[in-house]
Structure formats: C-alpha cells, structure tokens
Image: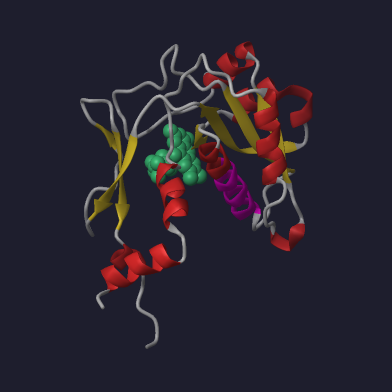
Amino acid sequence: MGDREMLRQAKLSLGLLDFEDTVRTCRSYRRFKEDEPLGRGFLLALVDIARKVASAANRQPLRYAIVDEPSACAELLGGLRWAGALADWDGPAEGERPSAYLVIFCEGDPGKFTWCDCGIAAQTIALASVEAGAGLCMLASFDPRVVCDVVGEGAKGLTPLLVLALGVPAETCVLETAEPGANLNYWRGPDGVHHVPKRTLAEVLIKGKE
Ligand SMILES: Cc1cc2nc3c(=O)[nH]c(=O)nc-3n(C[C@H](O)[C@H](O)[C@H](O)COP(=O)(O)O)c2cc1C
C-alpha cells in the first residue's frame, strides 16, 4: 500500500476526517459580517474553554480581555496591522470589520514557554470558533499602547501577546499545496477568494532512524 492510500485509510478508520475538515476550515479570516455580533456569552465561553488547555508547568500565565463594545472595537482596529502579504489591502472595510476581539496577555514579561502557552490557547479558541460557525484572525502585529489603552485598568502589569479578531466570516479561504521551494505567501484572487499555500507532508516530515 502506498503512503497516500495508507494516510487516507488511517484518517477514515480513525474517524479523523471531520476533525481534519474543522482544521481546514480554521483559517485566518480577516473579513467578517460586522452586523452579526457574537454575543458576550460566546466570548466568555471561548475564554472558559481556553483556560482549560495545557500550560508549561501548569503556571497558567495567560489573561484574557474581551473587547466587544463598538467604540472600543473601532479604537482597537486603529492599532492593528493586517495581512502584510496583501500589499494593496489596508485591512477590513466598514461593514466587514471584526465584531469583537479577545486579547491574550501574560503577567509581567513573557517567560520561556509563554508563547507556547499562548499558541495552544489561541488555536483552541480558533477551533472552538469554527465549531460555532465563527472565525478569527490572530494578530501579533499591533501597537501595544493602543491595545493596553483600549483594555484600560485591567491591562496594568500585563504584556499583550496576541489579538484575536473575531466574527462571522464573510470571505472564503482555501488551502493549497505548496511544492518545495514554492512561494509561501498567501494571496487573494480577483474573485476575492483567499489562498493559503501549505507545505506538503513529505516536506515537513523529516527522516528518522529506520
Ligand atoms: C503568531 C501569529 C501571528 C500572526 N499575526 C498576524 C498579524 O499581525 N496580522 C495578520 O493579518 N495576520 C497575522 N497572522 C495570521 C497569519 O498570517 C496566517 O496564519 C497565515 O497567513 C496562514 O494562514 P492560515 O492561518 O489561514 O493558515 C498571524 C498568525 C500567527 C500564528
């Protein structure tokens, strides 16, 4: 049996196809249905799920802020940098902006494993969002002063790590296969579809001892 067939059968027999579909749908969305709010309960649920994930030495250094009030969302938007690879796009226009944000902070300065904790939490929130028909974009390029200003008192003594821009997606994002050496930049076609090249299994899997 070839590797390709073995892979297909394994996913099928282990019931992984649905989960793989969720991961495939779990893209970085940058345009949303701005007039469809997610609701406070949903945002609280995302944080409640995130607090249960793995954490190095179980230190749990992460803290979360919910930003969902329209004027606060507008202020936060001004401090974000969107899609560096889409040179002629300035970020979401009115009507397609995120309806809410979660900001992930850590206490004090980030420690050795803080970014790892942050990634685990962010991806868990992303998967939960997709499961509920929403979507997000993780943003690490932002002005920390703007972020801390918007969050206010609660941000004192904390370092902002990642901004999660959330909403009901209003764009289609598709994965593509990137052959070794190919350009890995994401791009948007004339039809508005966002394309994301991913390395092949053969390229990411290194050869170990036989
Ligand atoms: C740690 C991290 C930081 C990111 N920061 C930004 C950002 O500042 N602005 C942005 O538009 N996208 C940002 N992204 C989204 C990436 O551009 C995106 O993950 C990448 O293009 C692949 O697309 P995909 O998430 O759909 O697979 C970030 C993603 C990660 C994981």
Q: Give x and y (percent) for residue 190.
A: 20, 25
Residue visible at 39% across and 63% down in the picture:
12
Q: Give x and y (percent) for residue 62.
A: 71, 45
Q: Give x and y (percent) for residue 38.
A: 59, 24
Q: Nearer the viewer, residue 68 or 26?
A: 26
Residue visible at 73% across and 37% down in the picture:
158
Q: In the picture shown, does residue 161 fall above or below 87? A: below
Q: Give x and y (percent) for residue 58.
A: 75, 59
Q: Is residue 148 visible?
A: no
Q: Nearer the viewer, residue 132 or 205?
A: 132
- Judged by its main secondary structure, the magenta piece is helix
How many numbered badges does the structure rendering display? Answer: 0
Which residue occupies the extreme bottom position in the image?
210
Quarter of image, res 25: top left
Quadrant where the image shows the N terminus: bottom left
Quadrant where the image shows the C terminus: bottom left
Give, as a single range, the part of the protein colored magenta. Answer: 114-125
Q: Nearer the viewer, residue 170 or 78?
A: 170
Ligand 1 position by quadrant: top left
Quarter of image, res 153: top right
Residue visible at 32% across and 64% down in the picture:
201
Q: Is residue 85 left or right of residue 65?
A: left
Q: In the picture shown, does residue 88 fall above or below 194? A: above
